[in-house]
Image: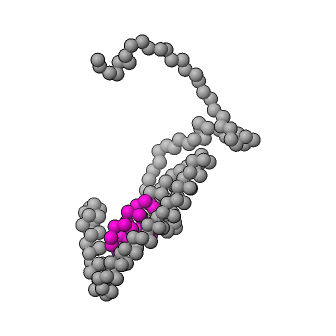
Amino acid sequence: MWLFFLFVGVPLIEIALFIQVGGWIGLWPTLGIVVLTAVMGTLLVRSQGAQAMASLRNSFNELNDPTEPLAHGAMILFSGALLLTPGFFTDALGFALLIPAFRKRILRELRKRVKVESVVSGQEQWNRNPRHPDVIEGDYEEEQQTPRNGPSGWTRH
């Protein structure tokens, strides 16, 4: 049912809003607003996307859980798509997704509905030495490979 709303309801809402706003302020100002929101949205998405990428890199560097920065990045990307789509309803949703508090609330609601069965953290595989933060301690095993003569068996002659 939500797909029906997405593909039929949203365009109908957009058409109704275009008719209403165009009737109030005229055709050219309405088109100007649509272009202006696309340009403003592009600039905002670019700056917030860069911040989200920096946050994601930071979480990877510190071996923290990257779930939240990834979710913020995905919502910013979706916001960009909404802002580039002509319309007032999609622009309102796109600008709302650019507000960090709104994104955090969406994440909070999603966490209530999503059940995580297991999580594997990098801490099990990597141990940082507090005295030498540039050194990553780990275990390894060296495997000997026997040389093969002839074809590997993956190809036919």
Which image quadrant is residue 38 in?
bottom left
Q: Residue at x 54, y 53 (%)?
A: 56
Residue 155, compared with residue 86, is above or below; it is above
Q: Residue 41: horizontal and vertical position, in percent? A: 43, 69
Q: Say whether residue 54 is magenta.
A: no
Q: Residue at x 46, y 64 (%)?
A: 45
Q: Residue furthest bottom?
A: 24
Q: Residue furthest right?
A: 131
Marks counted in the figure total 0
Foreground: 8 or 35? 35
Q: Residue 113: horizontal and vertical position, in percent? A: 43, 56
Q: Is residue 116 left or right of residue 19?
A: right
Residue 93 seen from this side? no
Q: Residue at x 57, y 47 (%)?
A: 60
User: Where's the C terminus, which quadrant?
Assistant: top left
Q: Residue 103: horizontal and vertical position, in percent? A: 48, 64
Q: Magenta region: which residues?
A: 75-97
Which image quadrant is residue 35 in?
bottom left
Residue 19, compared with residue 144, is above or below; it is below
Which image quadrant is residue 75 in?
bottom left
User: Where's the N terminus, which quadrant?
Assistant: bottom left
Q: How is the image coloured?
A: one colour
Q: Is residue 123 left or right of residue 28?
A: right
Residue 128, compared with residue 87, is above or below; it is above
Q: Residue furthest top?
A: 149
Q: Main secondary structure of the magenta part?
A: helix
Residue 4, compared with residue 59, is above or below; it is below
Residue 9 seen from this side? yes
Q: Residue 17: horizontal and vertical position, in percent? A: 30, 78
Q: Residue at x 37, y 66 (%)?
A: 84
